[in-house]
Amino acid sequence: MFTVSTSKYHHGDLRHGLIKAGRALLCDHGVAGLTLRATAREAGVSATAAYRHFADKEALLTAIAADGFVALETALRAADDHPDDRTAMRQQGVAYVQFAIANPNLVRLMFGGVIHQDGIGQAAFAVLAHRVAQCVGPENAETVTLGAWSIVHGLTALILDQRIKTNDPAALAAKILALLDLTRPSTC
Amino acid sequence: MFTVSTSKYHHGDLRHGLIKAGRALLCDHGVAGLTLRATAREAGVSATAAYRHFADKEALLTAIAADGFVALETALRAADDHPDDRTAMRQQGVAYVQFAIANPNLVRLMFGGVIHQDGIGQAAFAVLAHRVAQCVGPENAETVTLGAWSIVHGLTALILDQRIKTNDPAALAAKILALLDLTRPSTC
DNA sequence: TGTACATCAGTGAACGCGCGTTCACTGATGTAC
DNA sequence: TGTACATCAGTGAACGCGCGTTCACTGATGTAC
C-alpha cells in the first residue's frame, strides 16, 4: 500500500519528485532556470537531498531529459495508429512537432546539446523507424527514416526558434512531410 | 590610414575585437563558456570596456550570432553556384550542414534559443529561398523552401547532437536532400 | 601653431547574487536476534 | 514482541567561484578659437 508520511523525512519517491519539479521549472524558466538548487527548492527539499538520488547536476538533467524522451515516445506511439502506413507515419511527424510546441523548453533540453548520454531517446526514434520501414521497405528504411526525422526535427527547431511563424503548426508539418518522396527514395 | 596604437587605450575597433574573441571562446568552450567577462579577458580588455560597445551581455551575444549569420550567408552564396538550379540548391544544403559541422557551437548560439532578435539571419535564409523559387516556381516556393530548410536544419541539429552518426556528412546531406520531391510539391 | 576643454574609451575596485558541491549531522526506517 | 544497531534519506551551514553590472576614475583624442 501507499502511505503518506507526515514527516518531512523520507519523501517516498524524491527521485521522481525532483524530475517532476525540474520539468515544471524548465517549463516556466527555460533551461537556464533549471538549476539543481531551484529544482530541490521546487520539490520542497534541501539542495543537498538531491545528491542522494543524483550524482551531480548533469545526472539530474539527464534524468529529466530521459523522462521527456519517454513522453515523446508515448506521443509517437499514440499517433502511429492508422491502417495506411504512410498516414501513420505522417501522423507521427505531426505529433512530433506538436509535442515540441507543447513542451518547447523540454525539447530544448532534450536536443540542445546539454545532455551527453549516449543512446538516450533511441526508443522514440525506433517508433518512427519501424513505421518508415513498413512504408518503404528495409533497403530504403534508413535513409528515409533519417530524412523524415530530419525534416520534422528541423521544422520543430525552426518553429521553436521563431524562425518560422505559423498559427497552424500541425497543418504546416503535414504539408512539409508530404514533400518527402516515398516512391523513389533511392534515386539521386 | 591605419595606425596601430601602442597604448592600451583606444583599441581601434574593440567592438570587432570582442566579437572575434567571443567567437573564439565559443569554439573552445561552448555557449556556457561564452561570458561577457571571459570575452573581455580574451580580447585583452577589462570587462567594463565591453559596456562601451554593447548595452549588456545579450547584445554582445546577439552581435556574435549576427556575425555568424553573415558567415553562413557567405557560405551559402558560395555554394549556390551551378547552372542547374536543383544542383545549386542541393549544394547549398550540403554547405549548410558543413558550416554547422565546422562551427557547432556557433550554430548552437545562432539557433539555440539564446538570441531573441527578430529577423536575424533572414538574409541567409533568403539565399536558399531564392534558389528554391527558381527550382519549383513561385507558387510552390514557400512550402518547398521551408521543407528544404527544415530537412537540412534538422539533419544538422541531429548530427551536432550526436543523434545521427556519420563520417561523411556531406554525402548524407546530399542523399537526404534527394528525398525532397521537387516535381510534385503541392500534391498531398 | 597652441591651448583649453569637451568627449570618448578605457581602467580597477566593488556590489550582490546564485550557483554546485562538501561537510558533519540527525531523524526515520529496516533487520537480526 | 522488544530491543540494538546498521543503514538510509534527509538537514542546515558553509565553501569558493565566476558571473553581470555599477561606480568613480583617468588617459587619449578631437575640436574651437
Image (cartoon, coloured by chain):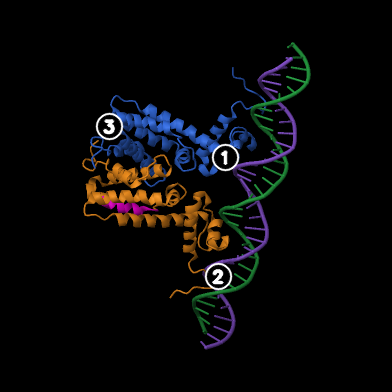
Chain colours: A orange, B blue, C green, D purple
**Label 1 vs label 2, nearer the camera:** 1
User: Is residue B186 visible from the viewing direction of this image?
Assistant: yes
> Which residue in the protein does label 1 denote?
B57
Question: Residue A144 sits in which quadrant?
Answer: top left
**Label 3 vs label 2, nearer the camera:** 3
Label 1: which secondary element: helix
Q: What stretch is highlighted in magenta?
A: A120-131
Chain of the residue displaying label 3: B
Chain of the residue displaying label 1: B
Q: Quadrant of the N terminus of chain B?
A: top right
Label 2: which secondary element: loop
Q: What residue type is labelled 2?
A: Tyr
Q: Distance between the residues labelled 1 and 2?
A: 42 Å
Of residues D29 and C22, which is closer to you in this image? Answer: D29
Q: Quadrant of the C terminus of chain B?
A: top left
Q: How far apart are marks 3 and 1 (CA)?
A: 42 Å
Q: Judge whether residue A130 is colored magenta.
A: yes
> Which residue in the protein does label 3 denote?
B136
Question: Residue B139 sits in which quadrant?
Answer: top left
Badge 3 or badge 1: first in the primary sequence? 1
Residue B167, percent from left and from top: 36, 40
Q: Judge whether residue A23 is colored magenta.
A: no
Q: What residue type is labelled 3?
A: Val
> Which residue in the protein does label 2 denote?
A9
Q: What residue type is labelled 1?
A: Lys
x 26%, y 56%: residue: A81
Q: In this view, does B14 lie above or below C21?
A: above
User: Which of the numbered marks, if any, corresponds to residue A128?
Assistant: none
Secondary structure mostly seen in the magenta stretch: helix
Q: Distance between the residues labelled 3 and 2?
A: 66 Å
Question: Residue A79 sits in which quadrant?
Answer: bottom left
